[in-house]
Image: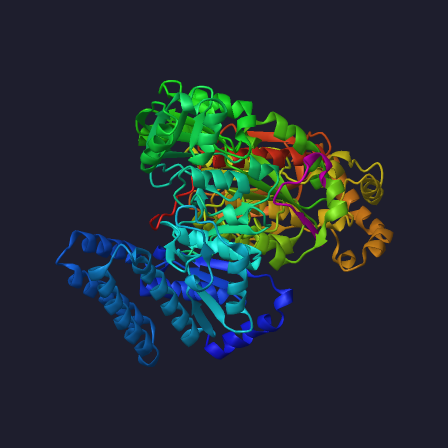
Amino acid sequence: MNQSNVIEQLSPNVNQLAKHAIHVHKFGGSSLASAQCIERVIDIIRQHCQLTDVVVVSANGGTTDALFSLYQQALDGSKELKITCAELKNMQAALIEQLLSPQHAQPLQQQLVKDITLLESWLTTEPTKYQADILAFGELWSARLLSAVLSEQVCPSHYIDARDFLVINNEEACQVNDDKSAKQLQSLLENTGKLAVITGYISKDEQGKSCTLGRNGSDYSATIMASLVGALNVTLWTDVDGIYSADPRVVPSARKLHRLPNGAAKELGRLGNPVLHAKTLQPLTDHSTHLHVANSFDAQVSGTEIGKFGQIAKQELSVTYLNDLLLAQSVSFQGAQGEFAQQEFTAICGDSHRGFIVIHQRQQKAVSQWLASHDTEVSFTPAAILATVGHKVIHQGDVQARFKRALKHDQPFAIVNSSSDHSIIAILLQSCTTELLNKVHHDMTKDARHIGLVVAGLGNIGERFLEMLPAQLNNIPALENLHLVGLVSSKQALINDDGIDVHHALTLFQQEAKAYDKELLLSWLSSHPYDEVIVVDITPSEQFSMLYEEFFKLGIHVIGANKWAASSSSENYNCLVNSAKINKSLWFGNTTVGAGLPINFAIKDLLNSGDQISEIAGIFSGTLSWLFESYDGSIPFSTLLTNALAQGITEPDPREDLSGRDVQRKLLILARAAGFELSLADIDCQNLVPESLQSLTKDEFLQQAEQLDAYFAEQQQLATEQSNCLRYIARFSVNKRGQVTAKVSLEVLDINDAFANLIPGDNIFQIKSIWYQDNALIIRGPGAGRDVTAGGIHSDLVNICQQLSHRQNQVKIKGIN
């Protein structure tokens, strides 16, 4: 996309500032580590930003470490200083050369030379005086370069040095002067018509001295700026897919937390989460801003969202740890004085009854001095903490008990509740090992996967499925973490990330459903906040079945009572099977044939066990079963058909049943399930409706239905004369040469045939195979009905949830800094 097109696309946002919320996008050092990474960031900005947004950047990956190394070399009087400066200059110069045309690169290269000269001057004169200014070069170079690349390739852009507006009290507390900072930032942003790229990590104090916000302070910068401009969203673009239930570098089974309540996220950052940092969420405490963590290496993957959510998100648990701490014990840490000490030193945890606090090692001197003024003794012991974190977790007795059980063999010094209510902390007098972390994580989160359920089709069967759902959720362990989150009809949908009350689902749908289209539904499904999503298709819609491939591409699982997809063209069917396999989506459709009867399951089980199927036959239509079990010629066939229609036994237009197409599709589905390559055209189908009646309207057909009577009376008479009966049979077989025969038709059967004596409406399936050659396997029972069909769908649901409970999604780590 050329620059003029992007400007044309983005410029209206400037003119309509009041109508568009501001978004802050922060890019970490690993996201800006190379020319290729920066080009990826440019694409993200092109797709996700408007001109009124704010982009915050860290130093290019490795730059801050190099500057720290230079600073240390200066303190040590190293003779390698100039060589290291030259290497740093060359690294930055190479990025400029790779990303900008010579015309636009030249000013930046000239400025870089001046910066390196100034850097060398500070390093060789008073490095301690200029420490923050030395470290600030990383963010300054990064912002300057990204802004220049944006201006050349995407849209007008300008970079802003955060020291020109961001004022804090000091580097220790990093408290922002909100009024002063907001006014100064606003003056730099307003009426520029350019996308602002702002340095993270750096600021100034009230005296105008450069300050840093601590390592990983760019995330803190981003949320500070969001609070200053009242941004709707902050996205932290990093190198992982989101925030995990434990550090994924050391816990392979860690799962992504799609949504985190603010309080739990803040506590995670305080207690050592490798992606969130202690101060990141502080500026958003009094704002409705939502925070997102996303992966700049894979921008299409939905990350983690932090904000205000309902009960499902509040159930999330995670485990975190910190080593290299100190347990400080003193009588001065008891009572009110102890509570004051916990606040004074922002202790990780403490107990004012037992008289101890847990602090970082760097705080030992300050704590000792404070206690000296109280003339009390203190003991310091090396320690670590291991914590389970979740929304108001200290009020969840079952979680507390599980955490204590998980640690019962490891003898922690103490287990305490955090003052925030969002964590339970075990204090260890040795380092937290990888083995212990994995063990406790497993015990705390083994049942924590959340599965979203979307039900499409709210007709007769759909209603019954939903009526059965509350009891199923209560009684079936496999459904423990299943949440109804979507209801979809042909024209309206109700989607709720926080879950739909299963006891009032249909009422809520009637009250709250909105019109939707395919794009809107797929948009939600592409960014859902669940470990897995299952779509249950109980529609008769061919159009809805065409969405299956899109579902599979999104890794969504499908339970289809809808026959269209499974009996579609061979090309489409094979495409769906392959897509589901590639994307690890499960596709169940046991109710497409036989309602709740386990015919699909039986075929699959035989194949998986090594058997080979040679014949499938039976009566597959509940309607045709009822008609021919009831028809004996004593009353006209048309009268029987009209009675069946009145009882709801047939389709609204009975010709759908009499055409045999439904039986033909079911036979195709079973043949494919048995491993045979087949299409509808390969199955001969006898249509029981005379050609003269096929093109009439439904009403016209019913008025002329007597034309059916002569044919069926004649067939029944022939069967009766031979003491036989009429049945509509589906048959599939393959001979030893691999030749396939398949047809559905009206047959005359011996009255002792297995297909001859059914309860009207029953289905029967007969399978012959290597194992069941002489004595066929027969499955028989009701092939239709609300309860059995809805029950069959629930059977698929339980089966799919059982399979998903053992699945672990691979953690994608490009490298957590």
The residue drawn where x is 34% and y is 22% is: 377
Residue 344 falls in image quadrant: top left
The stretch in magenta equals 490-505
Query: For this view, does 471 lie left or right of residue 255?
Result: right
Residue 353 higher or lower than 251, as above or below: above
Q: Residue furthest bottom?
A: 103
Query: Residue 662 in the image: x percent, y percent?
Result: 66, 47
Query: Residue 813 in the image: x percent, y percent?
Result: 36, 48
Q: Residue furthest right?
A: 703
- Residue 17 versus residue 346: which sits nearer the camera? 346
Query: Residue 357 in the image: x percent, y percent?
Result: 40, 27
Report if residue 115 is visible in the image.
Answer: yes
Q: Residue furthest left?
A: 79
492 part of magenta stretch: yes
Query: For this view, does 783 lie left or right of residue 639?
Result: left
Residue 262 falls in image quadrant: top right
Q: How is the image coloured?
A: rainbow
Query: For this view, does 647 lie left or right of residue 291?
Result: right
Residue 655 higher or lower than 770, as above or below: below
